[in-house]
């Protein structure tokens, strides 16, 4: 079992460029999440998907869109990247939304110039 | 006031020391209390969690919740260099449709 996988591991963008971060889990989990982690700010929830076919905004959704492609995959899209979106992005999954245990991927380090 | 507050440290201790990591939270509705550990350049992983109040022990780690003070703690006994990591507390209501709320994390360094 690979758990939660994320691609790419690293990315450098120029302001205004777009990109999609991919996430997949092989644990048959219902719920998936996207977080960003910045120094001094901790983990902040961007979007989440309680189950296949549903998505909801988290704490910091502006500038992002998500797609729950199927039960396994949850992608995060930056339509027009800004320097403020420079961060480490983590995808996570859990059996259900109200579950204390979330399983995290290895992260994507994104730099926007 | 943020829903969960955590001192970011850093905290440096010698090998073998007892470490105390703490968080405070603001809403008495929270009933699940988690501790995640994050090694450098890795994703967080769940260390342990407690439901409601009281203590929970797992090897050298003890999680403690004081709901009257809205205070949660993680104690590490006989700390090891391999315990060097960032520790994040997280809270959640016992309610369908809710997500975890994370503290900012405390960075711990254990020197040999």
Image (cartoon, rainbow, N blue to C red):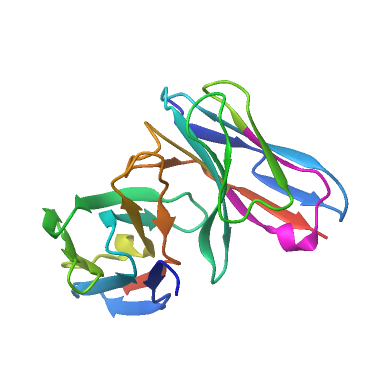
Residue at 74% over, 47% down: A11
In which quadrant is the N terminus of chain A drawn? top left
Using the image as rendered, state which of residue B5 and residue B1 is in the foreground.
B1
Against B29, is B70 above or below?
Answer: below
In which quarter of the view is residue B69 placed? bottom left
x and y percentages locating residue A56 in the rendered image: 57, 40
At x 52% / y 41%, what residue is drawn?
Answer: A33
The residue that appears at 47% across and 49% down in the rendered structure is B43
Q: Which residues are magenta?
A: A75-89
Q: How many marks?
A: 0
Judge from the rendering whether residue A89 lies leftward or rightward of residue B63; answer left or right. right
Vertical placement of A6 versus B49: above or below?
Answer: above
Q: Nearer the viewer, residue A13 or A78?
A: A78
Report x, y in % for residue A86.
Answer: 71, 59
Q: Is residue B112 visible?
A: no
**Left or right, residue B61 beside residue A56:** left
């Amino acid at each position: 079992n690979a758990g939660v996988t994320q691609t790419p591991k690293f990315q450098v963008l120029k302001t205004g460029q777009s990109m999609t971060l991919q996430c997949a889990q092989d644990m048959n989990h219902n719920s998936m999440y996207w977080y960003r982690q910045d120094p001094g700010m901790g983990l902040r929830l961007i979007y989440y998907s309680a189950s296949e076919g549903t998505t909801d905004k988290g704490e910091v959704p502006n500038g992002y869109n998500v797609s729950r492609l199927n039960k396994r995959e949850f992608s995060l899209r930056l339509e027009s990247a800004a320097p403020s979106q420079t961060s480490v992005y983590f995808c996570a999954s859990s059996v259900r939304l109200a579950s204390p245990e979330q399983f995290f991927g290895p992260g994507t380090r994104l730099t926007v110039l | 006031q943020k829903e969960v507050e955590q001192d970011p440290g850093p905290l440096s201790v010698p090998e073998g020391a007892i470490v105390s990591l703490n968080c405070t939270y603001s809403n008495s509705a929270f009933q699940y209390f988690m501790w995640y550990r994050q090694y450098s350049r890795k994703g967080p992983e769940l260390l342990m969690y407690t439901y409601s109040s009281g203590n929970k022990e797992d090897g050298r780690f003890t999680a403690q919740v004081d709901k009257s003070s809205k205070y949660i703690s993680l104690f590490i006994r006989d700390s090891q260099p391999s315990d060097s990591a960032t520790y994040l507390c997280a809270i959640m209501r016992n309610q369908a449709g809710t997500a975890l709320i994370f503290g900012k994390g405390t960075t711990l360094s254990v020197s040999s």
